[in-house]
Every structure is written in C-alpha cells, then in structure tokens.
Image (cartoon, rainbow, N blue to C red):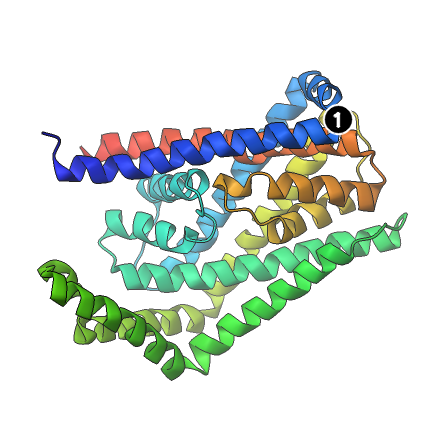
Amino acid sequence: MEPPHSRTRVRPAVRAAVGIALAVVVLAVFVRLTGGREVVVAVARADLGLVAVGSVAGVAAISAWGESLRHALTTTKPVGGLRYRLAYLSGDFARQILPMGRLSGSAIISYAVSRPFELEYEEALAAVTVADLLNLLSAVTVSGTGLLLLVLGSGFGDVRTFVAGLTGAVFVAGGVVVLVTRRRALLERAVVSVVGVGHRLAARLGLSTAERHLHPDAVGRRIESYFATLDAVAENRRRVAFAAVFAALGWVAFGTSLAVAAAALDVAVPFGAALFVAPASGLVGWSPLPGGSGGIEVAVTAGLAATAGVPVSAAAAVALLYRVCSYWVVVVVDAAAAGLLATLET
C-alpha cells in the first residue's frame, strides 16, 4: 500500500500536470484566434540567437527578484550563496507551475527559502511581504517610465486598461501598507477569527497536530514574530533600497526580454513600449492557470497593438515568443534548480 506522505507529494504534481495541460489548450485557442498558422510560422522563423538573449534576460529577471528578497531576508539572518539561490528558484518553480500559483506565490516562496536556513516561516513571510510590495511598486514605476518614453517619442494608442491596472496596483500596495502598519490590530483579529474556526474544527475531528498549530496562543506568537520581522526589515532602509533596486531591475529585464523577442521576429517595438507593456501585462493579465497563461499573452498582444501599432497576428507571435523566453525557459531553469537542491539535501 502506498504511504500517505507519498500520496500528498503526488497531489501537487497532478495539479501541476492538469494546470500545464489546460495552459497549453488555452494557448492553442489563443493562437487560433489571433492568426493561427501565420502566428506559428512567424515564431518558428525567429532568430535563435536573439531568442537565447531574450531567454537570458528572462532568467535574469527572476534572479534579480531573488536578490531583492535576499536583501530583505538578510535584515534578520544572513542568507545567500548557491543554496539560497537554488531554494528561491525551487520555490519559483512551484509558483510557476501550480494553478493559482501567482495568488499563493508569497506562501510558496516563504516556505522554500525558510527551510534551508532554519528561518521561522513567519520571518520569511514578512520579508516576502516587503519584497512583494517593492515588486508591485517597481512594476508601476518601470511601466510608467516606459509610458513616459512613449509620450516623449511617437505617442501611443488606447492604454486605458493598462493605466487602470497600474492605478489599481498602487491602491492595492497602499492598502497592504496601511494594514501592516496602521491597522495591525484589525488584521490580527481577522487572522485569529479565521484560524479559530480551523482550530475548533481540528478539535472536533481529533486532529491533534493541526489543533496544536492552530491554537490561539501559537497563532498569536506567530503574528508577533511576523510583525517584529516586518519592522526589522522596514527599518533597515539600506537593505530596503537594495531590494527595491533589484525589484526594478527584474522588470527592466522582462521589458528587455520582450523587446528582444520582438527583434527576433523582426517586429518594430520601441523599448519604451516594451518597458510599459511587460510590467503592465503582468498586473492586468491575471489568469488562474500556471504562470498566468492565457491572460498575459492576451495582455501583451493588446498592449503591443495599442502602444506600437503592431498588427494583431504579429503582436501575438511576439507575445508567444516573449513567454517562451520569460516563462517556459524560466520554468526549465527552475526545475533544474529544484533537482539540484534535492540532490544536495539528500
């Protein structure tokens, strides 16, 4: 009979396989609706040298975000080296391939980077919170810079949807900042109330381990640890500044990947448009599928058509190639990192 822990490891793998399969189906529909064979032929004729450059830029973007988090984490405990980078990429692998991974990404990354360094999960989550906020704000900043370059250059088309997405991102970031700085008591009461339901349910079902972890006293200590770490990170302005710089560099690298993907297909896309579209599409192109598949491709296609006047079929081809460079290649690198980390830990 198969051990229970083996079954629990299989479930995420099944979810990931189903999610990837659905993503492929959605992308096939996307290709069919935006030009079909014309799009496929265009991608197949891409300059492989430039595709390699775009892929390096995509991997560099994820690596920059890993460095952003490292600077946030280092305020509480020194982390770094090959083990940290492998742990971060392993967490990114899970975030990228699981359905709803973008929504639960903070929890996934927190678990991945806390394990090798004996960090408390709450400490890692606090650092990830800061890094995520900086990532969100840097996305708005980089995208706004790209929009400014377009305004100063040849102009742009209808970008209201993207500007609305950027504005929404600012409000979300502002709301999170208010909750964790000025409304902590409200946030703590909400968490304790939700966890209390789980605690009572675990008690009724006789789940002693879950009951112990969900006990109000244990939850209270974890909340205190989370806020203490959050304060320690926020007070180290030098580290926060470094984290912000690396977060912004990550978005610039993604913009570079998009611009290079367009060049590989001989499609004229100003760098300002690439800087605007890459972060904005990540914010407005939400999708529950792995890596935001489907939503981001549509957002990039619409963004390139609006800002650079690229025909829909050509824009779709650029979007697909950009995703090869910035998502599918990254997933392969993440998988290799996860495998290497598993080898080092055995």
Q: Is residue 101 found left or right of 315 in the rendered image?
A: left
Secondary structure beneath dot 1 equals loop
Q: Which residue is at the far right? A: 154
Instruction: Determine which quarter of the picture holds residue 29.
Output: top right
Instruction: Determine which quarter of the picture holds residue 308.
Output: top right
Report the residue at 31% width, 71% height from top. Answer: 194
Circle 1: residue type: Gly
Q: Is residue 264 found left or right of 169 in the rendered image?
A: right
Nearer-the-camera pick, 188 or 89: 188
Residue 161 location, x and y as percent? 73, 56
Nearer-the-camera pick, 249 or 198: 198
Instruction: Determine which quarter of the picture holds residue 58.
Output: top right
Report the residue at 53% width, 29% height from top. Answer: 24
Mark 1 burial class by Cα count in 10 Å: few <14, some 14-19, many 20+: some
Q: Is residue 298 found left or right of 21 in the rendered image?
A: right
Residue 225 location, x and y as percent? 27, 71
Residue 212 location, x and y as percent? 13, 66
Residue 158 location, x and y as percent? 83, 52
Residue receiving disc 1: 35
Report the residue at 41% width, 55% height from top. Answer: 106
